[in-house]
């Protein structure tokens, strides 16, 4: 997708949630793994963030500030995680639409996927997509939300 047709996106989620992989998948970059140390802009449209910004409450403000540049927030929840880093109503921190993205569906069973969706609903995600970057599933629906209308 040419970058001018894509909304500006910010990806938020714990370390190892699959944010960078998702970002790279979307931007068709190599699925090469680099640990994100700081906020990075990928492909001109996506803001990738370090998990530590969510995990350490004193750094969460950095996410709120970084999100100012985004049109849409992606809350990234790995399907194989028991529990979530997102507090209930987290989306209200941002005056922007929040989409929940379940990652690593290939590593989880139906029950785990349902739990992950419920965590994202509780966080305030208005739409939820289930993806696997390894199997390439869920991206058509996700891209619909990222396209400018
Ligand atoms: N099985 C599986 N592993 C994934 C998927 N997405 C990411 N991973 C793996 O999860 C780990 C963390 O991914 P990364 O994108 O770096 O997470 P980040 O810390 O949120 O940026 C890496 O080893 C990835 O290869 C997926 O859809 N399925
Ligand atoms: Mg990362």
Image (cartoon, rainbow, N blue to C red):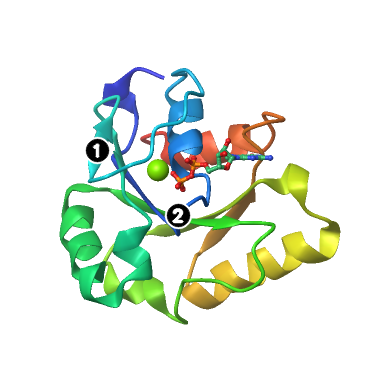
The residue identified by callout 2 is 15
Front residue of 33 and 83:
33
Q: Is residue 41 above or below residue 52?
A: above
Q: Which mark is residue 40?
A: 1
**Residue at figure coordinates x 19%, y 69% from the top left:** 61
**Quadrant for ligand 1?**
top right
Numbered disc 2: secondary structure: loop
At a point 44% along the width and 79% down the height, the residue shown is 87
Image quarter where the N terminus lies is: top left
Q: Position of residue 83 (x, y in %)?
A: 61, 74
Image location of residue 128, percent across then percent down: 59, 56
Answer with left or right where residue 57 lies relative to residue 107: left
The number of numbered discs placed on residues in the rendered structure image is 2
Q: Position of residue 100 (x, y in %)?
A: 52, 57
Label for residue 23? Answer: none
Q: Is residue 116 above or below residue 70?
A: below
- Given this view, does label 2 or label 1 mark the residue nearer the observer? 2
**Label 2 CB, ligand 1: below 8 Å?**
yes
At horizontal 26% and vertical 24% (from top left) the residue drawn is 4
Q: Nearer the viewer, residue 10 or 71?
A: 10
Per the model, the C-alpha gap separating discs 2 and 1 is 15 Å
Would you say 121 lies left or right of 95 here? right
Residue closest to the eye, 70 or 59: 59
Residue 34: name its quadrant. top left
Give whichever of discs 2 and 1 has the lower sequence position.
2
Badge 2 vs badge 1, beta-carbon distance below 8 Å? no
In percent of width and height, residue 2 lies at 34, 17
């Amino acid at each position: 997708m040419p970058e001018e047709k894509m909304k500006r996106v910010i990806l938020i989620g714990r370390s190892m949630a699959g944010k960078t992989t998702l970002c790279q998948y979307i931007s068709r970059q190599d699925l090469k793994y680099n640990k994100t140390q700081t906020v990075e802009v990928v492909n001109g449209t996506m803001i990738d963030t370090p998990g530590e910004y969510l995990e350490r409450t004193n750094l969460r403000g950095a996410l709120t500030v970084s999100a100012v540049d985004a049109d849409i927030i992606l809350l990234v929840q790995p399907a194989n995680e028991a529990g979530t880093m997102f507090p209930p109503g987290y989306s209200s921190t941002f005056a922007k639409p929040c989409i929940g993205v379940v990652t690593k569906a290939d590593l989880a069973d139906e029950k785990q996927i349902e739990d992950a969706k419920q965590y994202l609903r509780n966080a305030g995600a208005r739409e939820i997509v289930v993806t696997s970057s390894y199997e390439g599933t869920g991206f058509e629906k996700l891209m619909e939300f990222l396209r400018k209308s």
